[in-house]
């Protein structure tokens, strides 16, 4: 990606270089032209939500032959306050609330086993 262009302009440039129109991308990705235009113009607030933005960017990237991971990394640079925080942990990471749930579950199982063992002895 060229350093001087934003993500939306970069995606538009790649699409146009391939001779693809927005309706063609819309047909392939099942994303409305209105949302594709919002992506290309980086009007993120017009899109339905963070999860949708990520999905749309993945689909758009695949439709024009780009690596979705690279496009999402660029998006996270553009919108760091929204990018990583609301997308949850990346692959390989476990959220702290999920870790806590597992700790509670394991402690609960151990407690049940201890109670069974204790009452079985009597």
Image: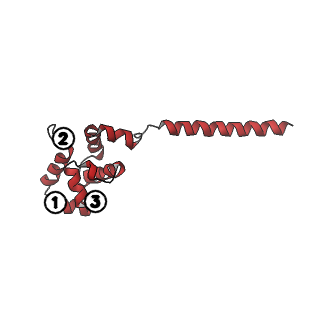
Residue 64 drawn above or below residue 81: below
Q: Horizontally, is 108 left or right of 32 in the view?
A: right
Q: Which residue occupies the extreme front position in the image? A: 45
Where is residue 106 shown, x and y percent of the image?
Answer: 63, 38
Mark 3, other Cα within 10 Å: few <14 / some 14–19 / many ≥20: some
Residue drawn at x 36%, y 50% is 51
Q: Dot 2 corresponds to which residue?
A: 1
Q: Is residue 9 visible?
A: yes
- Distance from disc 1 to disc 2, alpha carbons, whole Å, reads 20 Å
User: Who is closer to the viewer here, 26 or 37?
Assistant: 37
Single out the mark in the foreground, 3 or 2: 3
Classify mark 2: helix, strand or loop.
Answer: loop
Kindly identify the residue that appears in the image at 67 percent across and 40 percent down: 109
Spatial CA distance of label 3 from label 2 is 23 Å
Which residue in the protein does label 1 denote?
21
Figure check: 51 above or below 84: below
Residue 84: horizontal and vertical position, in percent?
A: 35, 39
Question: Which image quadrant for residue 121?
Answer: top right
- Which tag, 1 or 2, sits closer to the chain's start? 2
Which of marks 2 and 3 precedes in the sequence? 2
Q: Helix, strand or loop at disc 1?
A: loop
Q: Which residue is mark 3?
A: 31
Pointers 1 and 2 in contact (CB under 8 A)? no
Element carrying mark 3: loop
Percent x, y of residue 30:
29, 62
* Alpha carbon separation for disc pair 1 and 3: 13 Å
| Residue at 15% over, 41% down | 5
Estimate the x, y position of residue 43 in percent, counting from the top left: 23, 49
């Amino acid at each position: 990606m060229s350093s001087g262009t934003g993500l939306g302009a970069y995606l538009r440039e790649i699409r146009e270089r391939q001779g693809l129109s927005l309706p063609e991308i819309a047909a392939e990705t099942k994303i409305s032209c209105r949302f594709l235009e919002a992506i290309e113009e980086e009007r993120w607030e017009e899109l339905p939500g963070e999860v949708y933005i990520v999905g749309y960017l993945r689909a758009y990237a695949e439709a024009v032959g780009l690596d979705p991971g690279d496009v999402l990394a660029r998006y996270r640079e553009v919108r760091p306050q929204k990018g990583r925080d609301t997308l949850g942990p990346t692959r390989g990471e476990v959220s702290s609330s999920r870790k806590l749930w597992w700790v509670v579950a394991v402690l609960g199982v151990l407690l049940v086993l201890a109670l069974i063992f204790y009452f079985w002895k009597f």
